[in-house]
């Protein structure tokens, strides 16, 4: 991401789990804090993501995992059975680009969500922000 792209972003929300930005290219970008978060904080963060998708009209997500701790199993289950279906229905969101985290346990938790997500929700995993950003821009 170039500095000029960051200059065009708007921070929409944040909590101890991370920050949510609106990217004018048509997606919401999530940056995650490295600390392990309790379920209620993770759920609140994702509810802020859904509200951000609805308020901006964006339909895509870019989630930069960085040093994020693995999500607890209960959070993974909530994402795939509750949040993702609602995001698909309410915000017409069907795509998420993931910039992989470095922790192998984190990658396993991500794979669990990717493999159990509802049919019709597409994840694509990347090693760099630039590749994830280019993919989402290509969908617009």
Image (cartoon, rainbow, N blue to C red):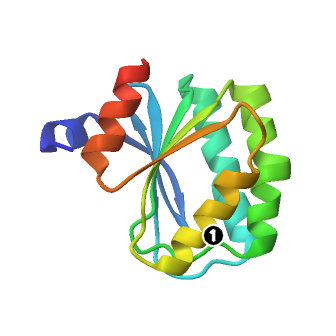
Query: Which quadrant of the structure image shows residue 70?
Result: bottom right
- Is 137 situated above or below 79? above
Secondary element type, mark 1: helix
Relative vertical location of residue 86 with respect to residue 105 in this rendering, above or below: above
State left or right for residue 57 relative to residue 68: right
127 left or right of 94?
left
On the picture, is 131 further left or further right than 42?
A: left
Between residue 129 and residue 107, name the one nearer to us.
Answer: 107
Q: Position of residue 49 (x, y in %)?
A: 61, 45
Q: Classify the position of the C terminus by image quarter.
A: top left
The residue identified by callout 1 is 109
Question: x and y percent of residue 83 in the render?
Answer: 77, 47
Residue count near mark 1 (Cα–Cα under 10 Å), binned few <14, some 14–19, many ≥20: some
| Point 15% across, 37% down: residue | 4
- Which residue is pictured at 55% across the width and 79% down the height? 105
Q: Is residue 24 visible?
A: no
Q: Residue at x 68, y 36 (%)?
A: 121
The residue located at (46%, 72%) in the rendering is 33
**Vertical placement of residue 10 versus 41, above or below:** above
């Amino acid at each position: 991401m170039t500095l000029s792209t960051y200059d065009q972003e708007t921070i929409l929300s944040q909590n101890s789990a991370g920050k949510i930005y609106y990217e004018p290219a048509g997606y919401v970008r999530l940056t995650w804090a490295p600390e392990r978060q309790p379920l209620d904080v993770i759920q609140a963060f994702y509810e802020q993501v859904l509200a951000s998708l609805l308020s901006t009209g964006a339909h895509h997500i870019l989630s930069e995992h960085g040093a994020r701790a693995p999500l607890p199993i209960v959070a993974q289950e909530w994402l795939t059975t509750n949040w993702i279906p609602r995001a698909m229905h309410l915000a017409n969101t069907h795509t998420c680009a993931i910039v992989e985290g470095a922790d192998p346990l984190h990658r396993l938790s991500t794979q669990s969500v990717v493999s159990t997500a509802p049919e019709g929700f597409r994840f694509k995993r990347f090693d760099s922000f630039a590749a994830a950003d280019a993919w989402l821009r290509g969908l617009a």
